């Protein structure tokens, strides 16, 4: 029993001694050479208070920025269908692609639409509008359609000089081949660029992406996508599209 009380008193006396040392002895030694060089003792000399410097970190979420861009630009994207001219007796061929509203009075910039197509339709805002081919260019694959509508939301075209290698871009398409319109999105990066053209990291796409705008994080169209019969992708720059519209 005496041994137990002995150890109890040792613990009590040791605890009291530790408290007194931390309150009186450590603060004194913290300012006395050579103990003032010891970091933990200097911290103890500050009354045991740890000072935390608050820092703020601002994070730019690129994914959120691109989602906002996609939702806004889709307001100016349309679906396109066109019956291609075929020889007598041949099965009917229908082109399904995408376009972008270029002017508020109904001009639609598209790509890959058959030059001699008939019954061209534009799908926009839950409605179907008959369209006429205003002009087309076989070399670039561009087509300018016209619908009888006004006050349409117009897309903004990017400055070619402002594009950067490695920049993420999104392709926005509307598939009008089914009973209901379907919005489609694919993405890649600008993998190379010259003084007059650029290409993206995507190799192949479905036909419906022909005419799809290539969108930057700034909610601007860097150009249009032209899809070949084999699914290969060619990019048409915004400068080419604007020049074609204004010719």
Image (spheres, grey):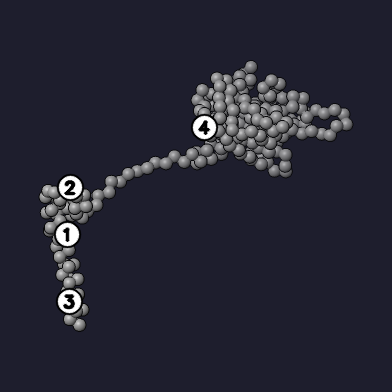
Regarding mark 3 in the picture, which secondary structure is present there?
helix
Say which label, 3 or 1, has the lower sequence index: 3
Calculate the distance from the C-alpha at mark 4 to the C-alpha at mark 2. 51 Å
Regarding mark 2 in the picture, which secondary structure is present there?
helix
| Residue ID at (19%, 71%) | 11
Q: Residues within 10 Å of mark 3 (few under 14, many from 20)?
A: few
- Residue 147 lies left or right of residue 161; in this view the side is right
Calculate the distance from the C-alpha at mark 1 to the C-alpha at mark 2. 17 Å
Regarding mark 1 in the picture, which secondary structure is present there?
helix
Residue 129, visible in the rendered structure: no
In the rendered image, the residue lying farthest to the front is 3
* Number of the label disc, if any, that sits on residue 31: none
CB-based contact (under 8 Å), mark 4 and mark 2: no
Query: Which residue has dot 1 on it?
Result: 22
| Residue ID at (79%, 33%) | 93
Say which label, 3 or 2, has the lower sequence index: 3
Nearer to me, 172 or 124:
172
Say which label, 4 or 3, has the lower sequence index: 3
Residue 87 location, x and y as percent?
85, 28
Query: Which residue has dot 4 on it?
Result: 167
Calculate the distance from the C-alpha at mark 4 to the C-alpha at mark 3. 75 Å
Query: Which residue has dot 2 on it?
Result: 37
Query: Which residue has dot 3 on it?
Result: 6
Q: Residues within 10 Å of mark 2 (few under 14, many from 20)?
A: few
Pair 4/1: label in front:
1
């Amino acid at each position: 029993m005496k041994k137990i009380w002995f150890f109890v008193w040792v613990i009590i006396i040791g605890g009291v001694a530790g408290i007194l040392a931390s309150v009186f002895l450590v603060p004194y030694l913290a300012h006395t050479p050579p103990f003032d060089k010891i970091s933990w003792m200097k911290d103890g000399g500050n009354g045991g208070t740890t000072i935390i410097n608050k820092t703020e970190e601002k994070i730019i979420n690129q994914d959120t920025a691109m989602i906002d861009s996609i939702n806004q630009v889709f307001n100016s994207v349309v679906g396109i269908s066109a019956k291609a001219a075929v020889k007598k007796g041949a099965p009917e061929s229908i082109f399904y692609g995408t376009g972008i509203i270029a002017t508020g009075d109904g001009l639609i910039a598209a790509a890959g639409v058959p030059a001699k197509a008939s019954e061209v339709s534009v799908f926009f805002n839950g409605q179907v509008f008959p369209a006429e081919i205003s002009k087309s260019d076989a070399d670039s694959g561009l087509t300018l359609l016209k619908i009888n509508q006004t006050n349409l939301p117009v897309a903004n075209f990017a400055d070619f000089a402002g594009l950067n290698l490695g920049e993420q871009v999104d392709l926005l398409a509307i598939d009008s081949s089914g009973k209901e319109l379907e919005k489609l999105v694919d993405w890649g990066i600008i993998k190379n660029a010259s003084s007059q053209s650029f290409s993206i990291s995507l190799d192949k796409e479905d036909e419906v992406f022909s005419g799809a705008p290539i969108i930057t994080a700034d909610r601007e169209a860097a150009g249009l996508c032209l899809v070949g019969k084999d699914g290969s992708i060619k990019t048409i720059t915004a400068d080419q599209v604007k020049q074609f519209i204004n010719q």
